[in-house]
Image (spheres, helix red, strand yellow):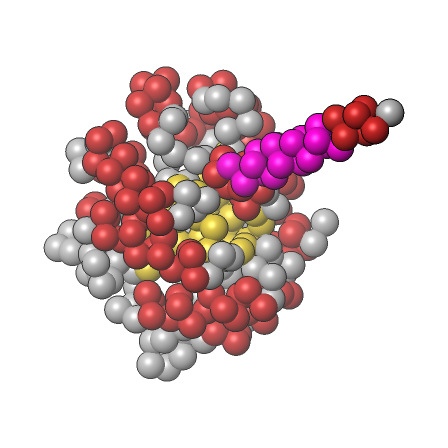
Amino acid sequence: MLQKLFFFTCLLALTACSNRKIAQQPDAVKSLHLKNTYGTYAAPPRLPNGRVNQQQLLAELKEINATTYHWLIWMNENDWDDLQIFLPLAKKQGLKVWVSLVPPSESKPIAKHSSEPYQMDYKTWAVEIARLSVKYPNLVAWSIDDFAHNLKLFTTSYTDSCLKGARAINPNLAFVPCVYYRQITPTFATNYGELIDGILFPYRAETGGGNLTDPTKVEPEIASIRKLFKKDFPVFVDIYATGHSRLGQSSVDYVKEVLAFSRKYADGVLIYCHQDPVKFAAKYNVIREGLNR
């Protein structure tokens, strides 16, 4: 009897140890971190000196019931410094944070701004973001905008080298690049599917010719993307609350409907961009209502 009791005690201990190891695997932790991703992207309220108005941003994110804020490093040279102020404040409020960098096609000299201070040195960015995520575990993911527009730089080997640098420091930090529907091809999935931890997919009804008026393609486009990747591969929808340079502005009703479909079919939702509650009150309120469901 004592031998049997000892055997079962050892078995339970081994099972518990095994379960702990499974739970601590990077893929499992990333999956946990990426769940319940609902929030906004970029366009934070700013002070007269251009710095982010931290308290106002936090208050607005709380009001709309966001679980996540996607911090863009681009419009101000102090965005990286302001992020480091924001992270502990966001942690106190229970907010997860993603960080986004701009690619070469959105950097100087093509654009007015670059991601500062490391600009297009993405290997250094990967390492520094990973270091910051160790200090502030609520920094759970990083992204590169228009990733697939810039594959001449972001080859599989270069991307892999960046990610190896980050993962050597924090294997639990997810990489979720921004990729448009037409760019998410079988070839892209084959080449990059094992490197990336999810897709941030800006919805533009591209199977309907491309527009910001038709919300009905959300479900089939997400389903089409999922078929290209491994089981349970996360797909996040970026919703155009702010207009597109070619496709124009989106309506309040459009944002409301795309948000409802995205919540139903995607793994998470981020709003492009964070809406000013005074200037864009109608869209702000629709987002608040949609995220509070």
Q: As rendered, which of 130 and 107 lies closer to the eye?
A: 130
Q: Residue at x 24, y 38 (%)?
A: 161
- Quarter of the rendering occupied by the N terminus: top right
Q: As rendered, which of 1 and 103 lies closer to the eye?
A: 1
Residue 23 in magenta stretch: yes
Asked whether the viewer can see residue 245, the reply is: no
Q: Quadrant of residue 258?
A: top right
Position above or below: 194 against 174? above
Quick check: 57 left or right of 261?
left
Tell me where residue 98 appears, x and y as whole percent: 45, 53
Quick check: 163 left or right of 86?
left
Tell me where residue 264 appears, x and y as whole percent: 65, 35
Magenta-colored span? 9-25
Q: Residue at x 81, y 24 (%)?
A: 4
Residue 261 in magenta stretch: no
Residue at the extreme right of the image, as rendered:
1
Q: Residue at x 59, y 55 (%)?
A: 67
